[in-house]
Amino acid sequence: MTEELIGIHHVTAMTDNAMRNYAFFTDVLGMRLVKKTVNQDDIQTYHTFFADDMGSPGTDMTFFDFPNNPKGIRGTNSISRTGLRVPNDAALDYYLERFKEFNVKNEGIQELFGKKVLPFEEADGQRYQLFSDEHNKGVAPGKPWKNGPVPEEKAIYGLGPVEITVSYFEEFKEALTEIYGMVPIIEEEDVTLFSIGEGGNGGQVILRKDETSQSGQGYGEVHHVSFRVKDHKAIKQWEAKYNELGLGHSGYVDRFYFEALYTRIGHILIEISTDGPGFMGDEPYETLGEGLSLTPFLEEKRDYIESQIRPFDTTRSN
């Protein structure tokens, strides 16, 4: 029997400027850079990981730095918005004022599925929304960044519901339920809210229907979403399940910080990732994310990699 998904593991998006993106996530949003490394499939490209204080699973928003790629085209058949969790409604009020201070484009505090949310955008058009955990129950959040610019009692501490928009709504809905065991908990016209694992804001997917627009991959868009499983045994069970279903997939991939398995459902790239080993094994807590971390199989190429990527100072401990 295949182990159930625990919740959201991470979301990976594309930026055209890793330095601007770093400043936005750390100085404005108050999330911690827990790893600065390179894309293991494209070693001339930065891969940055922003998360909670310790880089806990379920808190990672990650980015590929593609400065020469075209800007993405917003539309259907894409992961259309990423959720981020804050502790309560007062935290939304805090961020609304913060967004005014830093001129962050936002849509004001709203209500979605009975929860208070604050939709906003990064400079490149990447779309997010803050979800209040005021009355939330389910997948536990992480721990806010202790030394960040946002007070701990207000700070982002995990990923929230991920929004996916497709033109083949019923087919994708069936895939989420039949393959991934997600449970529809709210169904409205052209939108369904799904629950994963223990549910709540850390274990939900919003599926929307859009048969009119067209999307295009590029910076300012999401590359893929990943869902959590416990360990190596669980991810191998999912690999076997994909084989039984005849789903094309990447095969097991060891990413060093976690183990991974990828498949594509329609246009949407879905990853399954293990909760460990995590991000604390190769850097001290105090200087997490300050140096260029390379996995053991890339370490021998460090001189070449450092000659190819742009200098990018993320020192904060001094």
Image: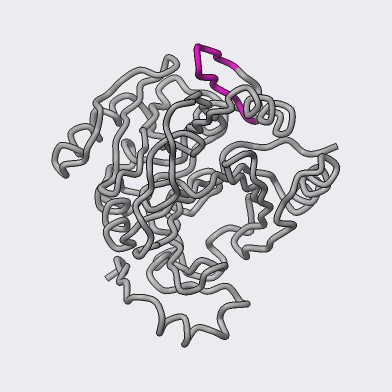
x 73%, y 58%: residue: 252
| Range shown magenta | 185-196
Q: Is 232 left or right of 40, judged from the image as shown?
A: right
148 lies above or below 108? below
Q: Position of residue 91 (x, y in %)?
A: 30, 31
Q: Main secondary structure of the magenta part?
A: strand
* Magenta stretch: includes residue 85: no
Instruction: Tell me where residue 83 sits by quadrant.
Output: top left
The residue at the far top in this view is: 188
Q: Position of residue 90 (x, y in %)?
A: 28, 26
x 50%, y 17%: residue: 190
Quadrant (top left, top right, bottom left, bottom right) of the C terminus: bottom left
189 lies above or below 289? above
Quadrant (top left, top right, bottom left, bottom right) of the N terminus: top right
Residue 289 visible, this orientation? yes
* Magenta stretch: includes residue 194: yes
| Colour basis | one colour
Q: Position of residue 36 (x, y in %)?
A: 43, 66
Q: Nearer the viewer, residue 34 or 121?
A: 121
Q: Is 39 left or right of 91, judged from the image as shown?
A: right
Instruction: Tell me where residue 186 sits by quadrant.
Output: top right
Q: Nearer the viewer, residue 12 or 146?
A: 12
Q: Nearer the viewer, residue 318 or 179?
A: 179
200 lies above or below 261? above
Q: Position of residue 227 (x, y in %)?
A: 61, 42
Q: Is 50 left or right of 206, judged from the image as shown?
A: left
